[in-house]
Amino acid sequence: MKTTVYDLVKANADVLHKLTSAGASAEDYKNIELYEEFVRLTREGLKTTYVVVHLCQEYELSERSVWRIVERFRRGIPG
């Protein structure tokens, strides 16, 4: 039997609820690599502003978009 969207949503309803409560969307999975690179480069000691500019060029995004992604991924999950 084929898995349906309903099956996945039902099985992950609690996680989906917490994610949407934190302002996340289903499309955020596309930004995992960008955020992991942000974390890696800042841990290596590069200045945050340099890292953001680098990611803008690499992913062809505006600075505001990169900051929005970083802020969303850093946000705590309520309750």
Image (spheres, rainbow, N blue to C red):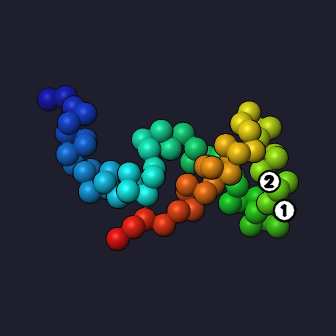
Under mark 1, the amino acid is Lys
Side of 19 relative to 46 (left or right): left
Residue position marked by numbered label 2 in the rendering: 51
Under mark 2, the amino acid is Val
Residue at left offset 21%, top offset 31%? 4
* Disc 1 element: loop
- In this rendering, the count of numbered labels is 2
Residue at left offset 38%, top offset 51%? 20
Quadrant in which the C terminus is drawn:
bottom left
| Location of residue 23 with respect to 29 vertically, above or below | below
Residue position marked by numbered label 1 in the rendering: 47
Mark 2, Cα crowd under 10 Å, few <14 / some 14-19 / many 20+, is some
Residue at left offset 71%, top offset 45%? 64
> How far apart, in angstroms, are the residues tagged by discs 1 and 2?
6 Å
Task: Find residue 69 and report its horizontal and vertical position in percent.
Answer: 61, 49
User: Are circles 1 and 2 on residues that touch, CB within 8 Å?
Assistant: yes
